[in-house]
Image: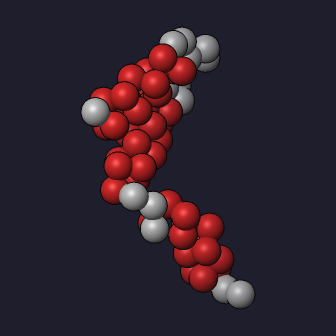
Amino acid sequence: MNVKSALNKIQEPITTADPQIQLIIKRVLQLEKDRLDLKAPRNINEDILKIIKEVIQ
C-alpha cells in the first residue's frame, strides 16, 4: 500500500460523510488550528458544541 492510498483510506470516513458532518469537521479543525498557539485553550468544548448546534439547525 503506497502513501497516497493509505491517506485515502484514512480520510474515507470523512470524505464519504454527510455534508453537514463534513462542515462540522472542517469548522472544528479550523477552530483547533486557530488555537494551536494558545498554551491553555479555554472553552473549546463550548465552541465545538456551538458549531454543532449551528450546523444541525
Q: Is residue 4 above or below residue 11?
A: below
> Can see residue 8?
yes
Going 46% across and 25% down the picture, which residue do you hit? 49
Coloring scheme of the render? Answer: secondary structure
10 horizontally vs 57: left or right: right
Q: Position of residue 13 (x, y in %)?
A: 55, 64
The quarter of the rendered structure image containing the N terminus is bottom right
> Can see residue 26?
no
Q: Position of residue 22 (x, y in %)?
A: 40, 53
Going 45% across and 46% down the picture, which residue do you hit? 25
The part of the image, by quadrant, that contains residue 38 is: top right
Q: Is residue 31 above or below residue 38?
A: below
Q: Is residue 24 above or below residue 11?
A: above
Q: How many marks?
A: 0
**View extreme (front): residue:** 57
Going 45% across and 37% down the picture, which residue do you hit? 28
The quarter of the rendered structure image containing the C terminus is top left
**View extreme (right): residue:** 1
Going 60% across and 82% down the picture, which residue do you hit? 5
- The one of 14 and 39 positioned closer to us in this rendering: 14
18 horizontally vs 54: left or right: right
- The one of 48 and 7 positioned closer to us in this rendering: 48
23 horizontally vs 36: left or right: left
- The one of 56 and 30 positioned closer to us in this rendering: 56
- The one of 56 and 27 positioned closer to us in this rendering: 56
Q: Position of residue 46 (x, y in %)?
A: 48, 17
Q: Position of residue 8 (x, y in %)?
A: 55, 75
The part of the image, by quadrant, that contains residue 53 is: top left
